[in-house]
Image: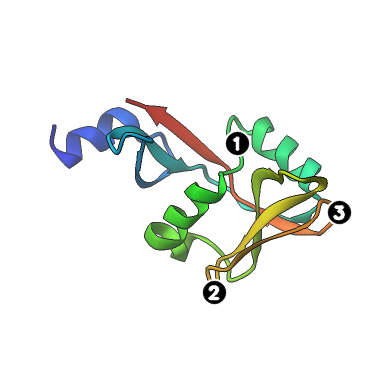
Amino acid sequence: MTKALFMQQRLKKGETYSGLMLGEDGGADYHLFILPGDAAGAPWEKQMAWAKSIGGDLPTRREQRVLFANAKKHFKPEWYWSKEQRADDSGNAWVQNFGSGYQHYDLKTFQGRARAVRRDYI
């Protein structure tokens, strides 16, 4: 399939193609798309609800690394929420800075930005 045909068939209006995500076996698993819109700073739960309300989801930490590598220009150089909570402390969730690429966790009350993504499984 050519890139143009792929884009015609899979890319929805206003979305940005971000890359192919590989599965645990190293094979192609799904395509990642950024949905249109950017949510200003808000706590984690509100950003999770916002992403769902527009038909998407917050990205995982792994997906955020791909977004930083492939689509950094679509983000402000600020902290963005991931969908992942800290495993040993449910009061925290992971964030990524799209200026530096650095990831860490913060209290869910932190006023982080958000971009929603869509996954198109192969």
Where on the picture, by quarter, is residue 33?
Answer: top left
Badge 2: how crowded within 10 Å, few (<14), some, or many (20+)? few
Q: What residue is at 46 percent from the left and 61 percent from the top?
A: 68
Total count of labels: 3
| Distance of label 3 from label 2 (alpha carbons) | 22 Å
Q: Secondary structure at mark 2?
A: loop
| Mark carried by residue 100 | 2
Q: Amino acid at mark 2?
A: Ser
Mark in front: 1 vs 2: 2
Q: Amino acid at mark 3?
A: Thr
Q: What residue is at 42 percent from the left and 54 percent from the top?
A: 66
Q: Secondary structure at mark 1?
A: loop
Where on the picture, by quarter, is residue 95?
Answer: bottom right
> Which residue is outermost to the bottom?
100
Q: Earlier in the sequence, mark 1 or mark 2?
A: 1
Residue 14 visible: no
Badge 1: how crowded within 10 Å, few (<14), some, or many (20+)? many
Q: What residue is at 55 percent from the left and 66 percent from the top?
A: 98
Q: Is 2 rendered above or below residue 86?
A: above
Q: Quadrant of the N terminus?
A: top left
Q: Whole-percent x and y of residue 8?
A: 26, 33
| Mark carried by residue 109 | 3
Q: Amino acid at mark 1?
A: Asp
Q: Quadrant of the C terminus?
A: top left
Q: Secondary structure at mark 3?
A: loop
| Mark carried by residue 57 | 1
| Distance of label 1 from label 2 (alpha carbons) | 23 Å
> Which residue is outermost to the top?
122
| Distance of label 1 from label 3 (alpha carbons) | 19 Å
Badge 3: how crowded within 10 Å, few (<14), some, or many (20+)? some
